[in-house]
Image (spheres, rainbow, N blue to C red):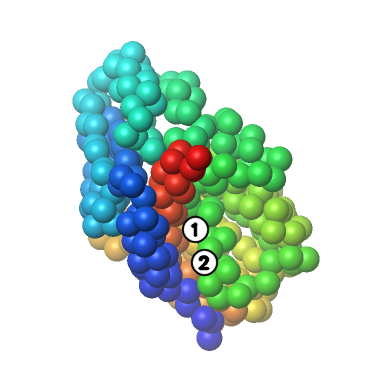
């Protein structure tokens, strides 16, 4: 039976460790969260992030814009936050409504406030092996693997998914940790050909229970990034019941990668505050 990685507990340990760093700052870290529209899942995520930030003593502010907010209005909010010295980190909750050019808007976030690691500058720093702020979900996955001492250097890893916020930076972080990495995506004819051989599999395809027992090898580390609500229950991209007996370590959904993502946002924000106050 696999070791089930308790993301909730690891995340709690990380956020607890941030309290002392927050206390050491002359003024609290400022996290600004921008939400456009009323997507119910986004509302939940933004509320959770705000609550955790407040409980850690951050100065957390939230900017809600209507779903039909024009590009210029969202841009103006981001520009104001970019110029505000009290703001250390800016998070624009995704997805943005379809009429907005998300890439262009996100590019307005200065790299030293990009605590979500979403801009092309952040991706560029990551791609040359000098991450400023790595995106929170893949960074959280790396910490979860480390928490269980899963060996990465010299091992093979497969990432299913190539989004800019999860799959691509995930592959890059694993490669920076000296894994040999393969990326599978929607045009990969048979991802199982790769996952069956892999020491580490990260499922981030956004497809409920995509990864089955026959797709992984005995003893593999299986990380489930997916989140889906099916029949009122949260499930992931991994068929947990089928895969867990075969894997070496595995993350549950909920309680695996999700809490780590929020913890990494908090950590990135504290780091942003520390860097901006450094002499
Ligand atoms: P996305 O839709 O932007 O990207 C999905 C990727 O998977 C694409 O690159 C696509 O090519 C690939 N893909 C789709 N179907 C595939 C298939 N059948 N086989 C192989 N590859 C396939 O999604 P995303 O933003 O990267 O998110 C992925 C999942 O992770 C979603 O379920 C999302 O809700 C979840 N997520 C969770 C967290 C968290 O904190 N746990 C954070 C972000 C996203």
Residues at marks 1 and 2 touching, judged by CB atoms closer than 8 Å: yes
Q: CA distance from mark 1 to mark 2?
A: 6 Å
Callout 2 secondary element: helix
Work out whether 216 lies above or below 164.
below
Work out whether 208 lies above or below 221.
above
The disc placed on residue 140 is 1
- The answer, for residue 37, to whether it is visible in the render is no
Residue 165: x %, y % from top left: 51, 42
Residue corresponding to mark 2: 144
Callout 1 secondary element: helix
Horizontal arrangement in the rendering, residue 181 relative to residue 239 (left or right): right
The disc placed on residue 92 is none
Residue at the spot x=24%, y=37% of the render?
62
- Judged from this view, the residue extending furthest toward the bottom is 1
Number of numbered discs overlaid on the protein picture = 2
Horizontal arrangement in the rendering, residue 274 relative to residue 145 (left or right): left
* Disc 1 residue: CB within 8 Å of ligand 1: yes
How many residues crowd around disc 2 within 10 Å: few (fewer than 14), some, or many (20 or more)? many
How many residues crowd around disc 1 within 10 Å: few (fewer than 14), some, or many (20 or more)? many
* Disc 2 residue: CB within 8 Å of ligand 1: no
Asked which quadrant contains residue 56, the reply is bottom left
């Amino acid at each position: 039976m696999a070791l089930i990685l308790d993301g909730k507990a690891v995340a709690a340990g990380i956020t607890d460790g941030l309290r002392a760093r927050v206390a050491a700052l002359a003024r609290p870290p400022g996290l600004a969260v921008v939400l456009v529209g009323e997507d119910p899942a986004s509302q939940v995520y933004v509320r959770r992030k705000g609550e955790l930030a407040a409980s850690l003593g951050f100065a957390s502010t939230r900017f809600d814009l209507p779903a039909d907010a024009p590009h210029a209005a969202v841009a103006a909010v981001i520009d104001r936050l970019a110029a505000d010295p009290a703001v250390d980190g800016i998070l624009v909750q995704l997805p943005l409504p379809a009429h907005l050019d998300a890439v262009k808007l996100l590019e307005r976030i200065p790299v030293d406030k990009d605590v979500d690691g979403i801009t092309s500058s952040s991706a560029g720093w990551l791609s040359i092996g000098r991450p400023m702020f790595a995106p929170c979900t893949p960074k959280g996955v790396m910490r979860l693997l480390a928490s269980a001492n899963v060996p990465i250097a010299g091992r093979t890893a497969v990432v299913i998914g190539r989004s800019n916020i999860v799959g691509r930076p995930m592959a890059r972080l694993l490669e920076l940790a000296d894994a040999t990495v393969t990326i599978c995506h929607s045009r990969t004819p048979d991802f199982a050909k790769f996952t069956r051989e892999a020491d580490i599999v990260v499922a981030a395809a956004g497809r409920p229970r995509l990864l089955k027992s026959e797709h992984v090898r005995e003893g593999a580390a299986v990380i489930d990034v997916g989140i889906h609500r099916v029949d009122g229950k949260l499930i992931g991209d991994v068929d947990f019941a089928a895969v867990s007996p075969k894997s070496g370590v595995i993350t549950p959904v909920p309680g695996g990668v999700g809490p780590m993502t929020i913890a990494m946002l908090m950590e990135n924000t504290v780091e942003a505050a520390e860097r901006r106050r450094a002499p």
